[in-house]
Amino acid sequence: MEEIKEENIEVKELGKKEIGWLAKEEESIQTPDGDYEKLPGVVFEEGKITTLMIDATEEFRNWTDPETQKTKALIPCTDNEGKKIFWCNKKNPIYKDVIHKCREAPNKAEVLVKIIQTGTKSQTRYNLVKE
């Protein structure tokens, strides 16, 4: 009987360590690593054109939401308020449009894009404004 109690104590202590580790791991997967976590995200408004200067000199980082398993591209950009991150679902049609625009741009460090948001919540759509 004494041996079983000692094993249970060890398991409980180990369990406490696991809980601490899991809490840290959960926190680390909720917030991606890197400089972009310190930058604010781009805020779009329905019916308003948002102008962004995208830096496409390096491959965009990706982040996968642990709950939905959706992967987002973290696109470094600048708007009229400063440096931001454009969190874009890679399956969203706007991502394809942004990639095409970046490929066509002569200066990959300063790719000018204008995006308009239509709809709200599940009906939200983003479109590239062509000039």
Image: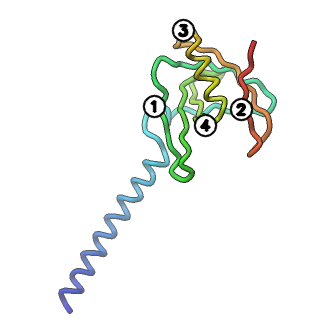
Q: Return the disc, 3 or 4, that comes first in the chain's sequence.
A: 4
Mark 4 surroundings within 10 Å by alpha-carbon count, few (fewer than 14), some (14 through 19), many (20 or more): few
Q: CA distance from mark 3 to mark 4?
A: 25 Å
Give the Cα distance between marks 1 and 4. Answer: 24 Å
Q: Disc 4 residue type?
A: Lys
Q: Amino acid at mark 3?
A: Asn
Mark 1 lies on residue:
35
Is disc 2 placed on a helix, strand or loop? Answer: loop
Category of crowding for the residue at label 1, using alpha-carbon neighbours closer than 10 angstroms: few (below 14), some (14–19), many (at least 20): few
The residues tagged by marks 4 and 2 sit, at their Cα atoms, a distance apart of 18 Å
- Outermost residue to the left: 3
Between circles 1 and 3, the one closer to the viewer is: 3
Q: Residues within 10 Å of mark 2 (few under 14, many from 20)?
A: some
Real-space Cα distance between discs 2 and 1? 22 Å
- Residue drawn at x 55%, y 28% as measured from the top left: 75
On the image, numbered disc 3 is attached to which residue? Answer: 107
Q: 13 or 113, which is in the foreground?
A: 113
Q: Is residue 4 above or below residue 20?
A: below
Residue matched to label 4: 91
Place of residue 95 in the rendered image (x, y in percent of width and height, measured from the top left): 61, 29
- Quadrant position of residue 72: top right
Q: Residue tagged by mark 2? A: 44
